[in-house]
Image (cartoon, grey):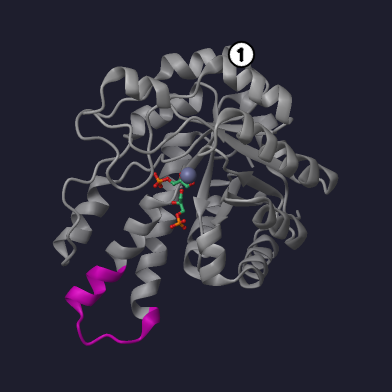
Amino acid sequence: MALVTTKEMFEKSMKEGFAIGAFNVNNMELIQGIVEAAAEQNSPVILQASSSAIKYAKINYLMKMIEAAVEEHPNIPIAIHLDHGPDFETCKMCVDSGFTSIMFDGSKYDFEENIRLTKEVVDYAHSKGVVVEAELGKLAGIEDDVNVSEADAMYTDPDQAEEFVRRTGVDSLAIAIGTSHGAYKFKGEAKLRFDILKQIKDKIPNTPIVLHGASTVIPELVEMCNKYGGDIPGAKGVPDEILHEASMSGVSKINVDTDLRLAMTAGIRKVFSEEPNVFDPRKYLIPARELVKETVSHKMKDVFGSANKA
Ligand code: G3H
Ligand code: 13P
Ligand code: ZN
């Protein structure tokens, strides 16, 4: 199987009620850990790279490593997706380099400008057979101490979602229902607005919904980082049960970066701390890659429901 678009994946996930994990990559160990988990779980998988990941690893290296992963695992549907494309030029570069899916993130613009810029990207990408994710609503800064009316203003408006999808022709939509990027998502209890998700699903039942900022911030990994010399106090993410509910309630794509950063760092820190004489990178990257694999495997099997859906 060659690289696939997310379109086929989402058709199946919407019909059968599960979510597909989209995991951020910027090096070989992440790609291998993720894809080996997908093969073990017989799960479709989306590998995604942000523009800063592309700057770090170079687009050619990323594409060639992902092509190698596809050759190694011919029975697993793998999509390569641009995460948070900031402008038309970056989106075009990824389309022209063989990405099968791209995101244009116009969430920082006002509604009309977001529509105008997203539509430009959609028109180009569709002419090349590439699908587009866009974002409506604002993720960052939704915190307990923000008063309700302010917080409400950041969530995706279901009526606007319908108008946005209709006017842009976008293939999938990232929404804001309470998640945020990074390791500090909630000060108090973790909570997502499933009521808003339902309203959005009612308005755009055929559009796959994407959840960004959806790492669990796995407590065991945070503990492991801290035990071996890290300093990440008070980190908190979206618990597995809530993500499982989202996977069964119409969310088709769940974005995970922070949990993989924690897994790699925990694996490396442990070796550094326990074996200070080690200076062969393979000695600490092997356990780091293994932790990435275990983390992804767990999500596919126990949380997203994508195991055996390849
Ligand atoms: O949503 C953002 C992702 O976690 C990517 O982060 O731009 O640091 O690669 P990055
Ligand atoms: P996390 O920071 O929760 O892993 O979110 C990643 C993400 O949304 C990438 O687009
Ligand atoms: Zn994101």
What residue sits 58% from the left and 44% below the top? 43
Nearest the viewer among 284 and 138 is: 138
Residue 254 drawn above or below residue 40:
above
Which residue, given by chain and number where applicable, does mark 1 sit on?
203
Nearest the viewer among 247 and 140 is: 140
Q: In the rendered structure, does residue 271 fall within the stretch colored magenta?
A: yes
Residue 44 pos. (x, y %): 61, 44
What residue sits 63% from the left and 63% below the top? 66
From this viewpoint, which residue is outermost toward the right?
A: 127
Q: Is residue 261 visible?
A: yes
Relative horizontal placement of residue 3, taking residue 17 as reference (left or right) = right
Q: Which residues are magenta?
A: 268-282
Splitting the image into four quadrants, where does ligand 1 fall? bottom left
Residue 275 drawn above or below residue 168:
below
Q: Amino acid at mark 1?
A: Lys
What residue sits 49% from the left and 24% below the top? 156
Crowd around label 1: few <14 · some 14–19 · many ≥20 (10 Å): some
Residue 172 pos. (x, y %): 64, 33
Give residue 225's quadrant in the image. bottom left
Relative horizontal placement of residue 211, taking residue 283 as reference (left or right) = right
Residue 289 pos. (x, y %): 42, 65
Magenta: main secondary structure: helix
Q: Is residue 31 visible?
A: no
Question: Which quarter of the rendering shows the C terminus?
Answer: top right
